[in-house]
Image (spheres, coloured by chain):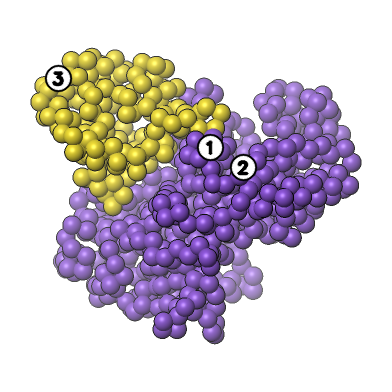
Chain colours: A purple, B yellow
Amino acid sequence: MLPPGIDANTFAAAIAAFKEAVGEQHVYTSNADVALYRDAYDIQWGLPGERQVSAAVAPTSVEEVQKVVIAANRYRIPIYPISTGMNLGYGGSAPNYSGSVVIDLKLMNRVIEVDDKRHFAIVEPGVTYFDFYRYVQDHGLKVWIDTPDPGWGSPVGNSLDHGVGYTYMNYRDHFYSHCGMEVVLPNGEILRTGMGALPGAQTWAEYHYGIGPYVDGLFSQSNMGIVTKMGFHLFPAPEAYRSGTVFAPRRRDLIALIDEVNYLEHSGTIGQPNYGTPLRAVAQQPAVRAVMEKVGGPTDAEFETVAREQHLPCWSCQLQFYGAPGVIDAGWAYAKERLAAAIPGATFRDDLSYRFPLTHEQELQIPHKPSLGVPNLEMFRSRSPMNPKPTDGHVWFSPLIPKSGEAVLEAQRVFGEASRGVDVPTLFGRGNPYGPLSTPQTWMYRAFVLISGWPISRENPAQNQRVIDALRHLVQVGAEHGWGEYRTPPAFQQEVVKTYSFNNHALHRFHETLKDAVDPNGIIAAGRYGIWPKHLRDKHE
Amino acid sequence: MNRRTFKSTQWVALFALGGLALGGLDATAAQAADPSAIAAGKAAFEYHCAACHGRERVAGGQMLPATASLALKYKGAVPAALEDRRDLTPAFVEYTVRHGVAVMPFFRKTMVSDADLDAIAAYLTRNNAPASAAAAAKSTAGTAGK
């Protein structure tokens, strides 16, 4: 296919220029090669709305990226940069603007620097979390990476899409923990942010701001440039780890539980807390379902009757401690003391305990490897006796809610009612994706995500359409309650951005003003997170 | 563009094609016998595939996800770990990597190069015995697909 509005002769000239920039072997134009850039988890797979690619170009250096961008500007070719293209569930390798040429940065895969005394790294976009981890291990460096789950993406791409991980404090917020970037601007010029603007800077990946306005955010979930290097703050490898779980007996204990865990987390005592409910294990029993799926939700008394009959507490929260052995033991004792005082009847269980470094065999046995900074793909355990035919992938609905028990209970009710009767399987079985047993994800340091996963099928477009309809409804319901998504697949980006509408969409209009100034020909990632260049704005907004 | 809407009948055809190629011996067996290709393929498999398809056991003695999935799918008819299979064909390996299956996405050439893919195929077909491979291909063809 041709990029929209580009004739065959112009496209041929652009392809020739791309080949001159990166070498013929790194320009992909055959149907078979180009098809590999489709989004494997596209909710619009095979439908008219599916995002297509016209060609792909894979530079191996920042100089080649510059040449490609300059050529794209000359011929007005829409381009779409990807790092490793593994943002599956949130867009993959396909562009928002169908027909764009993908700029595939996978071959820019150097770990440029890792410092385990000052605890930072600088990497290129094609480095995966697996690569990064191997580099640290192979060089015996005393730092941890913070990896998402799964770990096949890249630190650069993941952080630019506001991806998240599982260890300690702000290391889990991958954009927050980045420090400094190199960007090829739409005119082909190279920009270095923060301290990187100082020639010969000694602290590029250590001090965020440099001098003057801080602009790094303009390049995340955005289309103002192509990021070719990023710095990251790294977690000093701890000597030890332990975890323990607190159980709260009553439904409304969730309020005190979250308040206390917030204190422990925000004061640095614990890493990521993992909320759950033991009732999940019996949720498919007909008597339990009858209560939990009641219209309007169960009363507290009904909820607690189920728990009492099942001899289970209502809530659990696993706490994770990182650091010196004596310190983390004291941290767990302190946490139990506070929680026991705040929640009458709370009970506790000691869980895991590790001293580092681990042997390979010990590492294999870690139940959730990202909690210890180890990338893996174990989340793809999708086939089971209960689910013999796995899905073709998934999309995520990811609304942010406040870190309070009141907010969780309210969001359970609101999203439970809003998704009631949706006729699609959920990612992990059948039934309502939300309900009184939904518990929040805690990747963000200062907010919860009440996430739900939705299946895609490459053979059932009608089901995909029902998912699209359901998620569009949930986006609106969430926004009406002040809960916005932190990240969303391209099929929903326009609508989600529209919900961030304070003062007549002042923030979105500001983004558009910047886009027009920085990228007047509108070549880079048109439409990403709802930011369209001026010449396409009327057609797409 | 619905190239990945791959029906079970097509999987049968692909397996049959692989079986025929193996039955004819020659190219597949010769390629699989090249020690350097097999060594390169083992390294490429470990880099690109083993995190899902490896033999190692993880917490609780569980298989890795894709190995566990194939164990459920084939119910012992063929080994769950790809490295232990004797019925795979290069064409099948290459098709699967470039087209994906279920939750496994397809992989671009900047991720798994053609050279790496050839090497992986050589590694995964290294133990094929032509006659038994053809028979095995027939035995699994009926359960192939998603």
Identify the residue under disc 1. Answer: A362
Q: Are marks 1 and 2 on the same chain?
A: yes
Mark pair 2, 3: CA separation: 52 Å
Are the residues at dot 1 and dot 2 in contact (C-beta closer than 8 Å)? yes
Q: Nearer the viewer, residue A246 or A140?
A: A140
For mark 1, give the secondary structure: helix
What's the chain of the residue with tag 3? B
Density class for disc 3 (Cα within 10 Å; few <14, some 14-19, many ≥20) is some
Q: Amino acid at mark 1?
A: Gln
Q: Quadrant of the C terminus of chain B?
A: top left
Mark pair 1, 2: CA separation: 9 Å
Mark number, residue A354: 2
What's the chain of the residue with tag 2? A
Q: Nearer the viewer, residue A174 or B61?
A: B61
Mark pair 3, 1: CA separation: 43 Å
For mark 3, give the secondary structure: helix
Percent of width and height locating residue A285: 70, 23
Percent of width and height locating residue A308: 83, 27
Percent of width and height locating residue A388: 48, 24
Q: Amino acid at mark 2?
A: Tyr
Please tell me whether mark 2 or mark 3 is closer to you in this view: 2
Identify the residue under disc 3. Answer: B23
Density class for disc 1 (Cα within 10 Å; few <14, some 14-19, many ≥20) is few
- Residue drawn where x is 78% and y is 25% of the image: A310
